[in-house]
Image: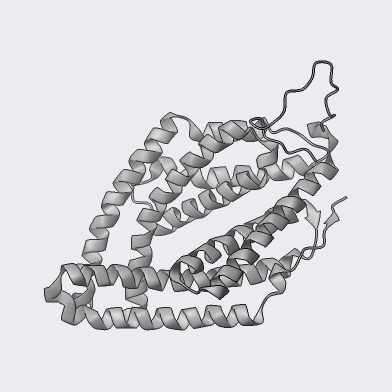
Amino acid sequence: MNTTSPRSAKPRHRGARATPQAKRTDHDLYRRVETSLAGMVAGLFGPASSLGQGEGREVIHQMRVNGRRLRVGLAFWAGLLDARELEQIQRHLRRIGDALGAIRVHDVNRQQVLKLAGADAKVVAPLLHHWQQQRAEELTAGCELLRLLQVSELDDRVRRLLQNARYRTKEQLQQEAARQLDGLRKGARQRLKKFAARPASKTFHKLRIAVKEYRYGLELAAELIRFDAKPRVNKATKLQSLMGKCHDAEVAAAATAEFIDQNKPLATGLRPVLKTLKKEQARRYAQVEKFLARQRSWLKKVRLTAHS
């Protein structure tokens, strides 16, 4: 299948015969792809106009998840999309993801302290107040970024990008899904090897991202191709959850330690909180290691059968 981007495509000689492309009416696979990605667009941009007007923490979380899924989905189907426009859109989506992440981290930190530390409310009140102030600043910055991107009609640009996809035959589309999925699988496997060879916060984080992208790729491919997706998705989701919880405890511990360093008079009361967070991080890390030692089938090569 030819998935060469417009930037790298060689000039076609005059009179050369163009490769036949599928029409929308040829099959419903494009409709599945468009419907899936359109749902992510709605999940990201739908709540954007009301951001900062008393939205719940879960709204921020879901916007971030949909944005992340959309970035993976657009990269998954990059061979069908205009390369230059896709590159610009992905850059803006990463900016949105970073802005939402900067807000979300304070929500997660707060949740970790209240759930795990079990400390007196008066002891952690200054810490939580500090994070709340930081969150308010990040929320203001995030709202301004989204306002500017709404003025530039980024959501409409994403929709037009999907509408102008270069159509392929059903078989070519399924082959592209298989190729992309295997690329994500190999990427996750490579990250796992690097983490096993050198366990560290950096390699852990990169593996966590690769697992997340592979899970999304499994879900995208399952819409077009028959394979034993559910067990793989379930295991990837489980690992993603374990690694995410470990990461949450690590980030909350680091933020708490930073606050203690900057507020020495409060250190005595907050050190037990920090100790609990670090202990919980170690426990969760052990769970990740246990899972990785026992579960490898989710990274085996996928045997695919085309949908009829």
Q: Position of residue 228 (x, y in %)?
A: 78, 66
Residue 71 relative to residue 78: left or right: left
Quadrant in which the N terminus is drawn:
top right
Residue 219 in view in this figure? no
Q: Which residue lies at the image location 74% right of the left edge and 56% below the top edge?
A: 222
Near-viewer residue (221 or 53) = 221
Residue 75 in view in this figure? yes
Q: Which residue lies at the image location 82% right of the left edge and 31% below the top edge?
A: 21
Which residue is at the far right? 308
Near-viewer residue (292 or 203) = 203
Vertical relation: 102 (above or below) 107 = above
Q: Position of residue 274 (x, y in %)?
A: 29, 78
Q: Position of residue 44 (x, y in %)?
A: 50, 46
Vertical relation: 86 (above or below) 175 = above
The colour style of the image is: one colour
Which residue is at the far top? 14
Q: Position of residue 205 (x, y in %)?
A: 48, 65
Residue 7 relative to residue 61: left or right: right
Quarter of the figure with residue 282: bottom left
Vertical relation: 267 (above or below) 42 = below
Residue 49 relative to residue 23: left or right: left
Q: Which residue lies at the image location 63% right of the left edge and 32% below the top edge?
A: 82
> How many badges with numbers are in the image?
0
Which residue is at the far left? 265
Quarter of the figure with residue 51: top left
Residue 67 relative to residue 9: left or right: left
Near-viewer residue (189 or 231) = 189
